[in-house]
Amino acid sequence: IVSQIPSLKNLDLRSNRFELPADDACFQFPNLETLIVDACGLSNWNDVLTIARMCPNLRECSLKQNDIKHIVSEKLSSEAFKKLEVLIISENQIEDFNEIMKLKDLSTLKEILVNDNKIKEVKLPNCDHKERLKDMFVSLESMNLRHNQIENEKQMFNELDKLPALTRLSYINQKASEGNENEIMESFMMAVGMMSNLVAFNRSEIEKIHRNDAMYEMWKKFAALWMQTGGEGDQKMDEFYQEHR
């Protein structure tokens, strides 16, 4: 059906089950730009790659509710998703952020939604506190990490500040009580105060006065630790900057 409608760009196949071809090279759908395969039993990432290879010009792909836990092969993923801009991998079973890191070479990826998974920690490679990582997620502007199981949100915000293009983040502390404005504001202050490139948090644009307030709060929070270091070049100072960019 798709091959008979060359003008078709968006295809929604959610909640279906289908047998993938043994030779995906025989099936090519170059006009498809958006594909929704939510709840299709695609727990094996190799099946996802098979579909991606059949849609070489795919720009947006939704993979919600597929019980995905592991993402295989950085190289194969980057080769299959050559033009992907938006990846929705929400409501799956991903526990380790290292699985998300296997997508770091997708050079066109602008937005990723990883909400409603089971991620407990966000960890990225080390780099100088005055610099950002140059060889991963180079185009990633927006990330959704809401409803995960993050144990240390301060560390998460500090790590995400390393990403070169990230400016929009969605996140809610799972320990925050429903409607508790103080806990929600604490997460907001920490995110804005620790991520200097952030322009929007939970879809709300960050005004200059809010950024100034957040940075002031972070100075109050961590100034005592900073004063205990021995200045530039001291090991304690280096360790401090690793945790408080």
Image (cartoon, helix red, strand yellow):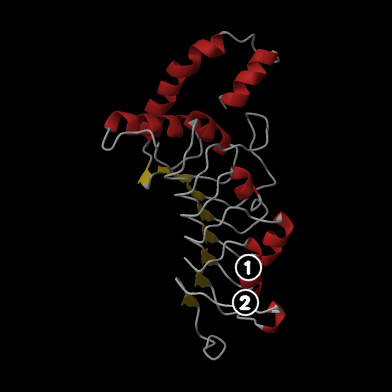
Residue lying farthest right?
75
Q: How many marks?
A: 2
For marks 2 and 1, the one nearer the N-term is: 2
Q: Nearer the viewer, residue 22 or 210?
A: 22
Q: Which mark is residue 47?
A: 1
In which quadrant will I find the C terminus?
A: top right
SS of the residue under disc 2: loop
Q: Measure the C-alpha gap from mark 2 to mark 1.
A: 8 Å
Residue lying farthest left?
179
Q: Residue 150 location in percent, x, y?
A: 48, 36
Residue type highlighted by circle 1: Asp
Q: Residue 81 location in percent, x, y?
A: 64, 64
Kindly indicate the quadrant of the structure image that contains residue 123: top right
Q: Nearer the viewer, residue 209 or 18?
A: 18
Residue placed under numbered mark 2 in the picture: 20
Location of residue 72 with respect to 34 vertically, above or below: above
Location of residue 143 with respect to 159 vertically, above or below: below
| Residue at 63% over, 30% down | 130
Q: Residue 79 location in percent, x, y?
A: 71, 64
Residue type highlighted by circle 2: Leu
Kindly indicate the quadrant of the structure image that contains residue 126: top right
Does residue 82 appear anywhere in the picture? no
Kindly indicate the quadrant of the structure image that contains residue 236: top right
Is there CB contact under 8 Å for labels 2 and 1? Answer: yes
Location of residue 122 with respect to 223 vertically, above or below: below
SS of the residue under disc 1: helix
Neighbourhood count class around disc 2 (C-alpha, 10 Å): few under 14, some 14–19, many 20 upward = few
Q: Nearer the viewer, residue 245 or 42?
A: 42
| Residue at 38% over, 33% down | 175
Does residue 205 appear anywhere in the picture? yes
| Residue at 53% over, 13% down | 225
